[in-house]
Amino acid sequence: MSYLSSSLSWLESEIPLIHSLSLILLYLVTIVIVAESLSRFFNKVNSEFTRKIVHIGAGNVILFAWWLDVPAWIGIGAAAIASSIALISLVIPILPSVNSVGRKSLGTFFYAISIGVLIALFWHLHEYEYAAIGILIMTWGDGMAAIVGQRFGKHHYRVFGIKKSWEGSLAMAFFSFLVTCSILVAVQGNIWQAWAISLIVSVVATVLEGFSVLGIDNLTVPIASAGLAYYCCYFLIPV
């Protein structure tokens, strides 16, 4: 039984579904408009930075879906549409702030797929926090790792020919831990297991993020992180 979910249960009856979806849509449109504006009208803004604005900003929608009790079929359907758009945008410049034409990565496609998979896995169990952990580790952890690595990365290493920085990996570990710990403490309470599980999840997520061939980490990181958090809580936290 989720401690945080019970404290927010009033939202389920007080806010109609159409209003919840309108709020989520407004948030997403705002994120895309900001990123597109930076991409189109400010030449000095790095295209990778605008992609990370969408990458991080769009992931936060899982919190809206959780708190507003959005049905699973809507989340899964939205993920399917987003993944289709991501594939198309690889060859047609629909949203330059999301994908550059010819960019040899399926990261955005995997990003959308992982959201749909996690909602499908955890929504019917009412274990929303684990879907949120997986998605927010992907968005904040991976997103901040790229930003910090590009801006401050001075010490590099390679994984299967892919150049990484220790600074970026530390950012990945830090934000993964912060995301996991914040959610688990909010749901389970400030117990030692929440901190220990957060540490385990953040280390595993950071290792998986290193294997980012073709953007596959946008699939492996969130699903593995969510699954690991779920099973660690199941075995370590008494009911």
Image (cartoon, helix red, strand yellow):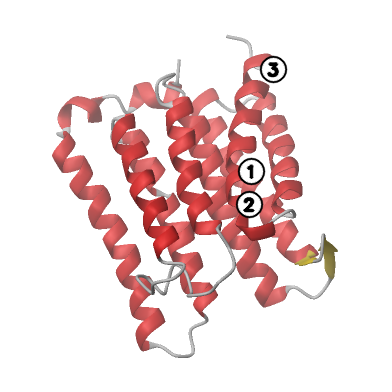
Q: Secondary structure at mark 1?
A: helix
Residue tagged by mark 3? Answer: 236
Q: Position of residue 239 (x, y in %)?
A: 57, 9
Residue depicted at 50% across the width and 27% down the height: 187
Among the 4 quarters of the image, the one containing residue 2: top left
Residue depicted at x 24% and y 30%: 11
The mark lying in front, picked from 3 and 1, is: 1
Quadrant of the drawing holding the N terminus: top left
| Discs 3, 1 touching: Cβ within 8 Å | no
Alpha-carbon span between mark 3 and mark 1: 23 Å
Taking the image as shown, residue 195 lies to the left or right of residue 106, namely right
- Hey, which quadrant is residue 224 in on the image? top right
Closest to the camera, between mark 3 and mark 2, is: 2
Residue sitting at x 58%, y 33%: 226
Name, please, the residue furthest toward the bottom: 43
Amino acid under label 1?
Answer: Thr
Looking at the rendered structure, the number of numbered marks drawn on it comes to: 3
Q: Which residue is mark 2?
A: 216
Q: Are marks 2 and 1 in contact (CB under 8 Å)?
A: yes
Vertical placement of residue 159 versus 148, above or below: above
Residue 187 vertical position relative to residue 215 in the rendered view, above or below: above
Which residue bears the numbered disc 1? Answer: 220
- Circle 3/circle 2 CB separation < 8 Å: no
Q: Position of residue 180 (x, y in %)?
A: 59, 39
**Residue 194 image-quadrant placement:** top right
Horizontal relation, residue 117 to residue 88: left or right: right
Q: Give how far apart the Cα atoms at labels 3 and 2 are.
A: 30 Å
Where residue 85 appears, as percent x and y from the top left, is 37, 58
Spot the residue most to the top: 239
Relative to 238, is 130 above or below? below
